[in-house]
């Protein structure tokens, strides 16, 4: 049994669920996109095509007319921002539109310069009217550009349900929040690791001092033992000398007694 599903079968299933007279697929007269213009308000914004999912981030676009209608030819991909240190080290700062933990660790003055990297993935053609919330995105209200490329949402000309747009925007905002939370957790973990390394260094230094004190204590204990042994020897010698002195005094006394007789 084969699990391979042909593209025409996928399109047929989509058309069953979302009836429309328009044929889902490439245009009958495809053209080579001429992507020449980059909009600063759209640059880096995620592109969500209804029926396909997230395509990537907006890079630039161009215009062309077909059958009296205006189309956008959008180049999409992924955008990353890196910071270059004085020693040549490259630090990732923003990946897929989300700041990394290094944004919190370094300041702009710490970098010699910045590098913007684009990874183009492909092109997307759509009617201008099929970009559902382009005005809201350009005003900075929505973080993701929603494109109804196949007219699945408003195939009969009806307006797109606002709750659908709100749901996609809410999901994207939730993803961004979770990503930022993840970076914050990672930053906290690195801070804890740094603190642990500092404490371990302090413990190693204290252990070194303790070892030195233990060595000195052993040396002092040896010296004290030697002094105690010397004191014992001196005490014994004093006792012997005392006994000898008493014997000598007794001898002198006897000699005096003999002399008196």
Image: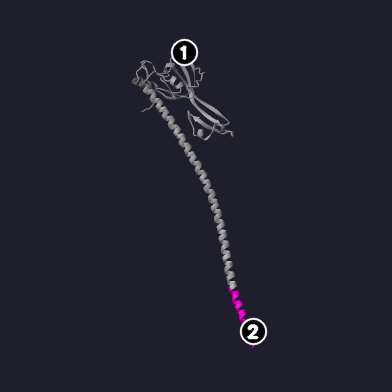
Q: CA distance from mark 2 to mark 1?
A: 149 Å
What number is the disc on residue 14?
A: none
Q: Describe residue 259's horizontal placement relative to residue 170 as left or right.
A: right
Q: Which residue appears at 63% of the width and 85% of the height?
A: 257
Q: Which residues are magenta?
A: 239-261
Residue 80: horizontal and vertical position, in percent?
51, 28
Identity of the residue furthest to the front in this view: 260
Quarter that holds the N terminus: top left
Q: Which residue appears at 58% of the width and 70% of the height?
A: 235
In the displayed structure, 136 sits above or below 178; it is above
Q: Residues within 10 Å of mark 1 (few under 14, many from 20)?
A: few
Residue 12: horizontal and vertical position, in percent?
36, 20
Q: Nearer the viewer, residue 16 or 117?
A: 117
Q: How is the image coloured?
A: one colour
Residue 67: horizontal and vertical position, in percent?
44, 11
Identity of the residue furthest to the top in this view: 68
Residue at label 2? 256
Decide whether residue 55 is among the magenta residues.
no
Task: State if disc 1 and disc 2 touch (CB < 8 Å).
Answer: no
What number is the disc on residue 65?
A: 1
**Nearer the viewer's eye, disc 2 or disc 1?**
2
The image shows a total of numbered marks equal to: 2
**Residue 242 visible somewhere in the drawing:** yes
Q: Residues within 10 Å of mark 2 (few under 14, many from 20)?
A: few
């Amino acid at each position: 049994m084969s699990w391979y599903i042909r593209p025409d079968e996928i399109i047929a299933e989509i058309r069953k669920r979302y009836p429309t007279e328009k044929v889902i697929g490439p245009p009958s007269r495809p053209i080579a996109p001429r992507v020449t213009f980059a909009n600063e308000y759209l640059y880096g914004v995620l592109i969500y095509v209804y029926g396909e999912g997230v395509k990537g981030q907006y890079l630039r676009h161009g215009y062309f007319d077909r059958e009296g209608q205006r189309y956008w030819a959008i180049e999409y991909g992924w955008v990353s921002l890196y910071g270059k240190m004085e020693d040549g080290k490259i630090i990732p700062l923003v990946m897929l539109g989300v700041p990394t933990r290094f944004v919190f660790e370094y300041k702009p003055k710490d970098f010699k310069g910045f590098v913007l990297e684009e990874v183009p993935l492909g092109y997307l053609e759509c009617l201008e009217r099929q970009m559902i919330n382009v005005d809201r995105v350009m005003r900075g209200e929505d973080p993701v550009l929603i494109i109804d490329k196949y007219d699945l949402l408003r195939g009969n000309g009806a307006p797109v349900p606002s709750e659908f747009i709100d749901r996609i925007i809410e999901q994207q905002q939730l993803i961004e929040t979770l990503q930022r939370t993840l970076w914050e957790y990672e930053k906290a973990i690195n801070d804890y690791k740094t603190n642990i390394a500092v404490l371990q260094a302090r413990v190693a230094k204290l252990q070194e001092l303790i070892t030195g004190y233990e060595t000195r204590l052993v040396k002092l204990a040896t010296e004290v033992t030697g002094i105690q042994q010397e004191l014992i020897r001196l005490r014994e010698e004093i006792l012997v000398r005392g006994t000898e002195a008493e014997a000598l005094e007794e001898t002198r006394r006897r000699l005096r007694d003999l002399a008196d007789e």
